[in-house]
Amino acid sequence: MHNLVSIKKFGVAVAVSMALHSADFAAQQPAKVIDSYALFEQPGRMIRLPQENKISLYCEGAGTPTILLEAGFGGGAYAAWHELQPRLAKITRTCSYDRAGFGFSELDHDLPRDIQHDVRDLHALLKAAGLPAPYVLVGHSDGGHIIGAFSDSYPQKTSALVFLDAAVLLDKQQVSGPPEKPSPEIQKYFDAQLGKIRGCLARAEAATGPLQPKPGDYCLNSDGLTGVPPRMISALSLIAARPDNWRAFLSEAEQHYIVDDNRWEVALLPHRWQNLPIRVFTASVASLDDEHSAASYGLPPSDHKAIAEARKGRERWEDLQARVCELAKDCKAVKLPTVEHEVQNAAPDQIAASIRLLVMDRRHSVQHHP
């Protein structure tokens, strides 16, 4: 694995925080009083791609520019955007989507689920949906790779970039040299994750109806579902029984754990972001004390050596994101004191307020420079 992948997956705990499947993530959410998941409890507008599969697109709000939300590893929209999208929809048209195979989207033969396919699909989706450019692109985690590569491929269609605790590729040195072999502990974790996903795929292929949530179940974990709306739980049960969901997830996981998935992106460097407004929000886990760091990394509080090593990896991750601001004239980086990788769920109001200013600025620029 090259250096960037090492940063993305430093230690088992960081890999856990980055690689939780969307069903697992939903199971960890605190109780909700308001059904913020409502948009995602059924398929959105189904948009047919050139390869004939259909993608579920969730749009709400009105106005320009359009905000496009790109989820991280796992590809489903609801876990990433149930807090932020309703807030942004009050500002302008805001859209998210389930990547091919995930959520309610069809997979068909749209494989492998790598960044090249992701960028191609996103471009085709926006065109087929008739959403006018340029877009304010918001990417969480691995979604940072996708919005960055999209911006490099289609610079005239990008109005601004917002990175949310996001993976980024800054220079060719990050992928230079021979691939770095993961440690035995990390390789063991990778193999275990792939085994769990294959097990869920086998269950989905044999299922005759929705999967029922069970405590500790990797395929559909009921732990912590108290407070998640019943209609969302029903939707998760349907999604977890869809083989497409697990085929897509397995392919995406293989790009992380087996294949060097960033070589295609290198061809786009250096990034053409100099004149784009950019905002970077990072979960500042590295500054937390051992007790909270251990909880974030999934490590025993008494294992101070492992915590220190994980903290170093996290510091590298945070520094990498801060360096994005070296690439743009108008860039602001904010560190949020949270253990949540999903910073948009930890601080949705703060992030929405920042994006609102971007939207207002873009509108002002269009009015004065049509």
Image: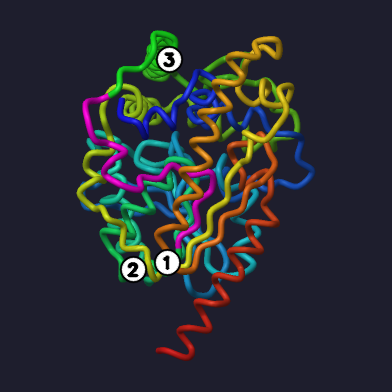
The local crowd at label 2, few if under 14, some if 14 to 19, many if 20 or more residues have their Cα within 10 Å, is: some
Q: Which residue appears at 36% of the width and 36% of the height?
A: 101
State the mark number for residue 186.
3
Q: Quadrant of residue 167?
A: top left
Q: How far apart are the alpha carbons under marks 3 and 1?
A: 37 Å
Q: Identify the amino acid type marked 3.
A: Ile
Location of residue 276 in the rendering, given as x and y in whole percent from the top left corner: 42, 68
Q: How far apart are the alpha carbons under marks 2 and 3?
A: 39 Å
Location of residue 64 in the rendering, given as x and y in whole percent from the top left corner: 49, 75
Q: Quadrant of residue 191?
A: top left
User: Are the residues tagged 2 and 1 within 8 Å (C-beta)?
Assistant: yes
Which numbered mark, 3 or 1, is in the foreground of this view? 3
Between disc 2 and disc 3, whose residue precedes? 2
On the image, numbered disc 2 is attached to which residue?
Answer: 157
* 30 relative to 204 in the view: left or right: right
Identify the magenta region: 161-179
SS for dot 3: helix
Q: Which residue appears at 23% of the width and 47% of the height?
A: 52
Which numbered mark, 2 or 3, is in the foreground of this view? 3
Q: Which residue appears at 35% of the width and 28% of the height?
A: 256
Q: Identify the amino acid type marked 1.
A: Tyr
SS for dot 1: strand
Between disc 2 and disc 1, whose residue precedes? 1
- Whether residue 148 appears in magenta in the rendering, the answer is no
Q: Identify the amino acid type marked 2.
A: Lys
* 106 relative to 285 in the view: left or right: left
- The C terminus, quarter of image: bottom left
Location of residue 262 in the rendering, given as x and y in whole percent from the top left corner: 28, 38
* 210 relative to 126 in the view: left or right: right
On the image, numbered disc 1 is attached to which residue?
Answer: 135
**Relative to the observer, which residue lies in front, 107 or 159?**
159
